[in-house]
Image (cartoon, rainbow, N blue to C red):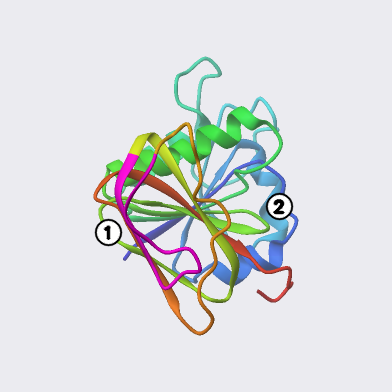
Amino acid sequence: MKRCVIIGGADIGRYDRVNRLLREDDFGIYCDCGLRHRERLNLPPGLIVGDFDSHPRPATDTETIVLPREKDDTDSVYAAKEAIRRGYDSFLLAGMVGGRLDHTLGNVALLLYLDSMKKQAVLVDDWSEMEIVSFEPKQIEDRYFCFSLISLGGPAKGIDIRNAKYPLTDGVIPSEYQYGISNEVLPGRTATVSVREGRLLLIRNLKEDPGA
């Protein structure tokens, strides 16, 4: 499956971890000040997009789309839409969590947008991996410290959690009571999470091990 990696401008502390997730055939899009990560990531830019309000427009032969500063789409949302237009079905998002909370929440919402388009997408930061649970069950290996489930966009119903310390059958998590925080995979097992109605943000939290 063709994968697009979109790099935003939030801080990245563990470049080694992001680099381990990259593949040789990834198509890289750098968004505006996400270019500050270029030298430390093993990801050549296939496309650069931005309004360049936070980073100078680079002098480069790489394809560059200059966006207006007054617009509805953030640079990262525009990048995702452009990648979909170019036929990409799988996404890895990095440099999108931390700093301004509004940008962080907007990038979490980008996961919802990609999910609604039936695209696979994972958002990573230094200590976690995030994706949406909706149409298909998701698995969590026991190499993670813990995992959490956050209901987005209204109550999530018909939730099943298996092979975890806190299992659940046909459960409901409403938006105003997020009780699905800090669950654990049973040792040596692989947990499975599914939902019948609504959508969940699955956050896999890494162990405090630089090699995790």
**Residue 59 showing in the rendered view:** no
Q: Nearer the viewer, residue 162 or 93?
A: 162
Q: Choose top left, top right, bottom left or bottom right for residue 114.
A: top left
Q: Which residue is mark 1?
A: 136
Q: Nearer the viewer, residue 186 or 18?
A: 186
Q: Which residue is mark 2?
A: 12
Q: Choose top left, top right, bottom left or bottom right for residue 138.
A: bottom left
Q: Secondary structure at mark 2?
A: loop
Residue type for callout 1: Glu
Q: Residue at x 51, y 76 (%)?
A: 186
**Magenta span includes 162:** yes
**Residue 180 showing in the rendered view:** yes
Q: Nearer the viewer, residue 172 or 156?
A: 172
Count of marks placed on residues: 2
Where residue 205 sits in the image (x, y, percent)? 60, 61
Q: Residue at x 44, y 39 (%)?
A: 110
Looking at the image, residue 57 lies above or below residue 2: above
Q: Who comes first in sequence, dot 1 or dot 2?
A: 2
Where residue 145 sits in the image (x, y, percent)? 63, 68
Where residue 115 sits in the image (x, y, percent)? 33, 46
Query: Are there few (<14), some (14-19), or many (20+) residues within 10 Å of tag 2?
Result: many
Q: Residue at x 60, y 43 (%)?
A: 96
Looking at the image, residue 81 lies above or below residue 12: above
Residue type for callout 2: Ile
Q: Residue at x 54, y 81 (%)?
A: 187
Q: Is the Cβ of the residue at disc 1 closer than 8 Å to that at disc 2?
A: no
For residue 87, the mark is none
**Magenta span includes 139:** no
Q: Secondary structure at mark 1?
A: loop
Looking at the image, residue 2 lies above or below residue 199: below
Where residue 97 sits in the image (x, y, percent)? 63, 43
Q: Which residues are magenta?
A: 156-173
